[in-house]
Amino acid sequence: MEIPYTVEAHPETGLNNGKIGIWLFLTSEVMLFGALFATFIMLRIGSDGNWAAMQAEAELNIPLATLNTAVLIASSLTMVMAWASLMRGQLGRFKVFGWLTVGCGGIFLVIKYFEYTAKFEHHHYPESSTFLAIYFAMTGLHALHVIGGMAWNAYFTGPGSKLFHTNRQWLTDRVEHSGLFWHFVDLVWIFLFPVFYLL
Amino acid sequence: MAEPVHASPAHDEHHHDQSFWRKYIFSTDHKVIGVQYSVTGLAFLFFGFVLMMLMRWNLAYPGEPIPFIGSLLGENRAPGGIMLPDFYNELGAMHGTIMVFLGVVPLAVGGFGNFVMPLQLGAPDMAFPRINMISYWCLFLGGVTMFASFFLPNGAAGNGWTSYSPLADIALNGQTAWLIGMIFLITSSLLGAVNFITTAIQLRAPGMTWMRLPFFCWAQIVTAFLLLLAFPPLEAAGVLQLMDRVANTSFFIPEGLVVGGEVLERSGGGSPLLWQHLFWFLAHPEVYVLILPAMGIVAEVIANNSRKPLWGYRSMVYSLIFLGFMSFIVWAHHMFITGMGSVMSTFFQTTTMIISIPSVIILSALFISLWGGSIRYNTPMLFALGFLPMFGIGGLTGLPLGLSAADIPLHDTYYVIGHFHYVVAPGTLFALFAGVYYWFPKVTGRKMNEFLGQLHFWPSLVFMNGVFFPMMIQGLNGVSRRLADGGISYDFAGEVAGLNRMMSVSAWCLALAQIPFIINFFMSIRNGEKAGRNPWNSTTVEWLAPSPAPHGNFDQEIVVTRGPYEYSVPGSDKDYVPQAEPAST
Amino acid sequence: MSEHVDIDKQVRIYFLVFGALMVGTLATVGAYYLEVSVPVALTIGLFIASVKASLVACFFMHLIDEKKIIYWTLALTVAFFIALMALPLLTSVADQVGEFAEVEAHEPH
C-alpha cells in the first residue's frame, strides 16, 4: 500500500509528508530547548549576583569553543552542499559532502570530549554549581542531538544512498529533511556558545 | 487532485503474506496499532483502578489488614496485611500517573485517534506508519518501566503524580524509574502528535475541506498540537530532575535545605518553583488532552443517535481551537498558594475564567443538539448522555478553584480530587466507553450486546457518583488529600470521615459493574451480532469501509461531497446522507 | 524548495552565508574581549546570535521561501515559546513585587 504524498507534493500545501513532519518535530525541539533556556534565565536571575563568579570558577575554554562553533558552521555548509549536489544529480559529490558533514560532527564531539574531561580533571562536576549543572545539561543534550544527526546523515550517505538509483527525488527530500534537523542543531549551538562562554 | 491516489486493496493483496509478527505485533497498519493502544490503555486503566481499590481499603478501614490479598503484598509494603503509609503514597502517585499517561491518553489519543481518524479522513493509513509503530512501542516500554518500578527494592515513585521538588529530588523510592518511564511516554506522544497532524494536513480525501472534518478529527488535531508543544518542557524538566537525582545537581533544590534535621549537602541555588512551572506548563494542557478527544467522541455519538446535525458545528470548532490556545496560559492557577503574588494570581485567574467560556459553548452546543432529535437510546448514546451532566459537574466545580481567593482554602483538599475526577472519570471515561461501544463494530465486524451494555452503564453511573460526590463534601470540610488514613486523625474530619466507607463500597461496586463490560467485550468479538459496514446508519466516512477494514482501508475511491452530519435532510429518502456517496452499494 | 531552483545561485548564497556566520562568530568573541558592562554585553551577544540564527534559518533551512503551512506552524510555536519564556520573567517580577510589598509593610509610618 502506498501512502500518498510521500515523495510528490500535496497540491494544496505544496509539500510532501516528510517536510511537514520534520518541521513539526522541530517545533517540539524549539519548546524543549526553550524550556531549558527558561531554566537558565531563572537560575541566572535567582543567583543573587553569583552567576559571574560561578562562570569564572568553571573556567570554560573559549578558544576551543570558538573552534567548535566554526566546525559546526562548516558542517552546516557541507550539509547544504550535500543537498545541492543531489539536486544537481551528482551522487559522488553528495557522498563526499555527506561524509564531511558526519566528520565535522565527529570533530565537534571530540573537542567536546576534551572540554568535558578537562572539567572533570579540575573537579568541576554538574553538582559543583548551578552554572555547571545547566552547562552540562544543555551542552550534553545538544551533544546527543549531534550524535543523532550524525547517525541520520551517515545512514543516508552510506546504505540509504542506494535510493539514488530508484527514486532520486525521495533521497533528495530525505537529505533535505535530515539537513533541516542538522541546521537546527547548529542553530541551538549558535545560542549556547555566547550564553555559556561569553556572557 | 485528478488522479485517484488511493491504491486499491485488491491490487495489494498479493504482497500481504505477512508473518504473524508483522501483522499483529510489529504492524504498521494504523488500525492494528490503534487496537494495540486501546488494549494497552484498557489494561492500564484496570490496573490503575486496582491500585485505587487498595487505597480505598486503607481510607475506609485505616490500620486494619486488607482481606484476602493483604498477605500477598509483601512485608515491606503491608506487614501483616496492614498497608504502610509509604506504600499508600506509592499507590497514590502511580494511580495518578498510570490513569493519566498510560490509561486515558493511550486509549483516547493513541487508540481512538489512531483507529478512527485516518478512516474519518478517508486516508489509507497514517502519514508515517513506521513512526506510528515506534510510537506505540515507546509507550509500551514506558508502561513496562512504570509497572516494573513496583518491584524495585524501595518501591515505586511515591511523590504524587505531580512529583514536586524538592521531595521528588531526594526521595529514596522509585522516582528515577518514574522519570525514565515518563521520558519514554513523552517520546511516544511526540511521535504520535507529529504523525496525527501531518496525516490531517496531507491525507484528507478529495473534497474533505477543513469545515467538513468530523468534530472528532478536530479534537484530535488540537490535542496533537497540545501534546507537541506542551510535552517538551516536561521532558526538559524530567531530564533536570533526573540529573538532580543521579548527578546530584541542584536545579530544584534551594540553598540550605534541611532534610531530617541536617542541611543537605548540595550546592543549592535552584528553585523548587521552577519544577512547578515546568510541570504545569505541560500538565494544564494535559487536562485538555484528556478531555478534548472525549468531547469529540461524544459529539460523534450524539449527532448519530439524535439523527440531527450538530448544533453550531462551526462555533464548536472555533471554541476547540480557542480552548487549545488558552490552555497554554492558565497553568499557574495550580500554584495560587505558592506565594507568587497577587499580580500573577490576578492574571492567571482571569485567563482561567476566560477558558471556561469555550468549554461551556461546546457543552451547550451538545445539549442543544439533542433538542427535537429522534433520539435512539442505545449503549453508546447512554454513555454519551451520561458524559454531559457529569462533565458539567466537573467543570462547574472547577470554577471556585480557578479563583485564587476561593482556591486558598480548597487547595489540596478532597474537593480538588472530586472536581478533577468528575471531569476525567464519569466524564472522559464515559465518553471513552461510548467510543468503545460505538466503534467496536468497525474493529471486529460485530456489535456489542445491548443488554450487557445497559447493565454496565446504569450501575456505573450510580457508583461513579457514589465515589466522587462525597469527596466534595469532605473537601469543603477541609479534609486534605494524600492522607493514608483518610484524615481520621484530624478532628475536623470527624463528621465527614464516615463518608470514606460509603465511597470505598461504591468503588468496589463500581468494579463489579465493569464485569458485564469485560464479558461483553470478549464475548462479542466472536459471538456478537454481525454488523455490516454501517450498523448505526452514520454519515461519516469511516462507515464506508468494510468492517473490519483491510490494510489500506477502503475498497472504493472516497470523494467527499458534503458536511459531516447530514442527518434527517428534508427531501432525502433515508434519514442520513453519507459524506461521500458510495459509487456501488 | 524542491523544484525550479537555480542551484548555482543557491550555492553562491550558501558560501556568502557561511562567510557571514564566521564573521559573526569572530565578532561575538571579539566583543567579549572588549569587556563592556554586563547589560551591553548581553545585548551585543544576543543580537549577533539572533542575526546568525536568522541567517541559518532563512538560507540553510530555506525559510526565506517556504510554504504557508510551515509559516503558520512556526508562528504558533513562537506564540507558545513566548509564553514559555515569560515563565522566568513572571517569577522574577512576582518576586520583586513581593519584596516591594514587604519593604512597604515594614516601613514605619
Image (tube, grey):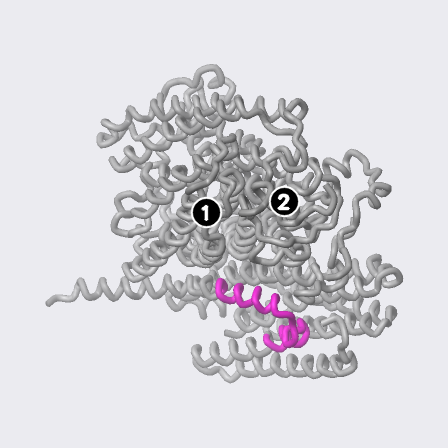
Front residue of C53/C102: it is C53
Image position, residue B462 (x, y; %): 39, 27
Q: Are marks 2 and 1 in contact (CB under 8 Å)?
A: no
Residue B5 occupies which quadrant of the picture?
bottom right
Compared with residue B341, is residue B24 higher up or lower down, i.e. above or below? above
The residue under label 1 is which amino acid type? Val
Residue B36 showing in the rendered view? no
* Chain containing the residue with disc 1: B
Q: Give the residue displayed 56% in from the left and 61% down from the top.
A: A138
Residue A115 occupies which quadrant of the picture?
bottom right
Q: Which residue is mark 1?
A: B287
Q: Residues within 10 Å of mark 1 (few under 14, many from 20)?
A: some
User: Can residue C68 be found in the magenta stretch?
Assistant: yes
* Left/right of residue B254 with respect to residue A3 in the rendered view: left
Q: Which residue is mark 2?
A: B114
Q: Nearer the viewer, mark 2 or mark 1?
A: 2
Q: Residue furthest top?
A: B68
Front residue of A64/B215: it is B215
Range drawn in magenta: C54-81
Compared with residue A81, is residue A122 higher up or lower down, i.e. above or below? above
